Image (cartoon, grey):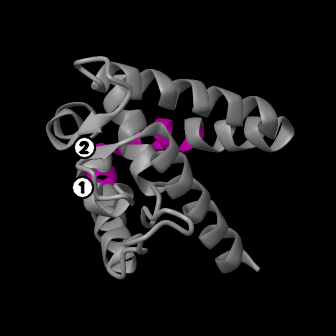
Amino acid sequence: MNRHWIAAVAVTILAMPAFAADGLPGATVRDDSAKAAAERRARFEQWCKDNPEQCREAKAKAQQRRAECKADPEKCRAELQAKGQERFKRADANGDGRLSREEAQKGMPLVARDFDRIDANKDGFVTPQELEAARKVRADARKGKGS
């Protein structure tokens, strides 16, 4: 079993509930996020039934990572930010610093899924700034749910 696939499944469980852009025109939070989260959980539970050993390994790895991030959250944020920037750079096939819908579909499918919500200025491209605004809204929404 490919480790990247296992990690992707684990990340899917922790995946963001929605994309939106803080204070930008046309930005919204997905109202079907609860349904999408339930579907992700169901897929993961089925995968765990089908692959119990890999599931245990993925859960243990995720638990270890959470402990590491709790101990040093700034390091984890920096690592995630660097990974995100690298993924964006790889997905930006023409190197213009922004993603077209096609580039997002090929290189960042979760961005492509919510492309219209992330593209706050409706110019047909997603920029790193729009992605950061979407992440900020998502993080703020999580904080609000946990309060």
Q: Quadrant of the N terminus?
A: top left
Q: Can residue 1 be spotted in the picture? A: no
Q: CA distance from mark 2 to mark 1?
A: 6 Å
Between 13 and 18, the residue placed more toward the observer is 18
Pinpoint residue 102: horizontal percent, then vertical percent: 14, 38
Q: Nearer the viewer, residue 59 or 11?
A: 11
The residue at which mark 2 appears reads as: 109
* Residue type indicated by callout 1: Arg
Q: Quadrant of the C terminus?
A: bottom right
Q: Which residue is mark 1?
A: 113
Mark 1 is surrounded, within 10 Å at the Cα level, by few (under 14), some (14 to 19) or many (20 or more) other residues, namely some
Is 29 situated above or below 2? below
Image coordinates of residue 32 in percent, x first then y, are: 32, 79
Q: Which residue type does callout 2 highlight?
A: Pro
Quadrant in which residue 65 is drawn: top right
Q: Nearer the viewer, residue 142 or 41?
A: 142
| Residue at x 67% of width, y 37% of height | 64
The residue most toward the left is: 102
**Residue found at x 51% / y 43%:** 129
Give me the residue at 64% from left, 44% from top.
Answer: 63
**10 Å crowding of disc 2: few (<14), some (14-19), many (20+):** some
Residue at the spot 76% in from the left edge and 29% down from the top edge = 75
Is the stretch drawn in magenta largely helix, strand or loop? Answer: helix
Please give the label number shown on residue 19.
none
Q: Are marks 2 and 1 in contact (CB under 8 Å)?
A: yes
Per the rendered image, the range of residues in magenta is 47-60
